[in-house]
Image: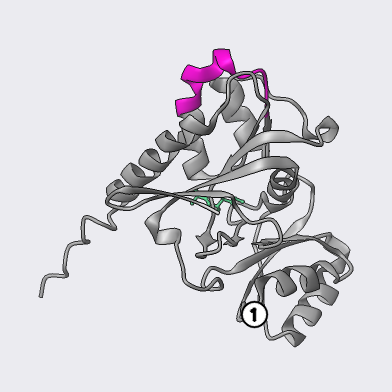
Amino acid sequence: MNSPSPSPATSPEEIQRRKLAAAREALAYVQPGELLGIGSGSTVNIFISLLAERAGDIPAVVAASKASETALTAAGLRVRSMDDVSQLGIYVDGADEIDPRFRMIKGGGAALTREKIIAQAAERFVCIVDASKEVDRLGRFPLPIEIVPPARALVAATVERMGGVVRERAGVVTDNGNLILDVTGLDFGDPEALERNLNQIPGVVCNGVFALRPADVCITAGERVTIRKR
Ligand code: 5RP
């Protein structure tokens, strides 16, 4: 029996088309003369490639990962270090999941800590996703947690007592020199409480629940592009 061919809605080509459509809409949020924040991941990489044509309007960009910094520099944009920036206008980033209140799981690319810092500093967080990232309730995507290496056993045991199943991301060291634990099975009934509770565990640098600082604008590309604001 022949296996069914993938539906056009979910083929890799269609997902790429959707990421491009979402990224293109986000260009409208880039204000000339304003410092811009950029996240990381494949959707953001498409956004960076589109940003090249706006390089003349943008004084500088702060980036959430070394990979994004490299792509931005190649696109002709000036990258500024985040460590002397406490405020910026717009932050554009993707997500691994986003719920109807624009709370997210992020960190699939291991850049969650810098992503959360820039999101917190930004006046407006514009999230760009294809429709596969939309969920009614967070928790299907394994939750990334960045930890300092000596905390591995303690954090794993604590998260397991909270109901999580922990797997260390093999071969990954973050841009900050840390490790990533990917966790399934946690209760996402109250994402803000979960985000706070995980932050309390010694050795946790950052967790991938983005609920206390959700996105402000969500640009979702399915068959059509939808723009929603909080
Ligand atoms: C990286 C992230 C990304 O935003 C997230 O993984 C989505 O990536 P992509 O656009 O490749 O699907 O949080 O840490």
Is residue 76 among what the camera can see? no
Structural crowding at the residue carrying mark 1, measured as other residues with C-alpha within 10 Å and reported as few (<14), some (14–19) or many (≥20): many
Residue 130 at what x, y percent from top left?
40, 52
Q: Is residue 52 magenta?
A: yes
Of residues 185 and 127, the one drawn nearer to the viewer in this rendering: 127
Left or right relative to 132: residue 107: right
Q: Is residue 98 above or below residue 121?
A: below
- Occupied quadrant, residue 187: bottom right
Q: Position of residue 4 (x, y in %)?
A: 16, 68
Outermost residue, top side = 56
Q: Amino acid at mark 1?
A: Leu
Q: Residue at x 80, y 32 (%)?
A: 85
Circle 1 sits in a helix, a strand or a loop, which is it?
loop
Of residues 224 and 111, the one drawn nearer to the viewer in this rendering: 224
Residue 160 left/right relative to 184: right
In the image, what residue occupies the spot 64% across and 80% down?
186
Tell me, yes or no, whether the highlighted magenta stretch contains residue 172: no
The main secondary structure of the magenta stretch is helix
Say which of 170 and 201 sits in front.
201
Relative image position of residue 149 (x, y in whole percent): 83, 61
The structure residue drawn at horizontal position 21% and vertical position 55%, both measured from the top left corner, is: 8
**Taking 65 as reference, is 74 above or below it?**
above
Asked where in the image residue 230 lies, by quadrant, the reply is bottom right
Quadrant assignment for the N terminus: bottom left
Q: Is residue 181 visible?
A: yes
Q: Is residue 133 left or right of residue 222?
A: right
Q: Which residue is mark 1?
A: 186
For the magenta stretch, what is the residue range?
A: 50-61
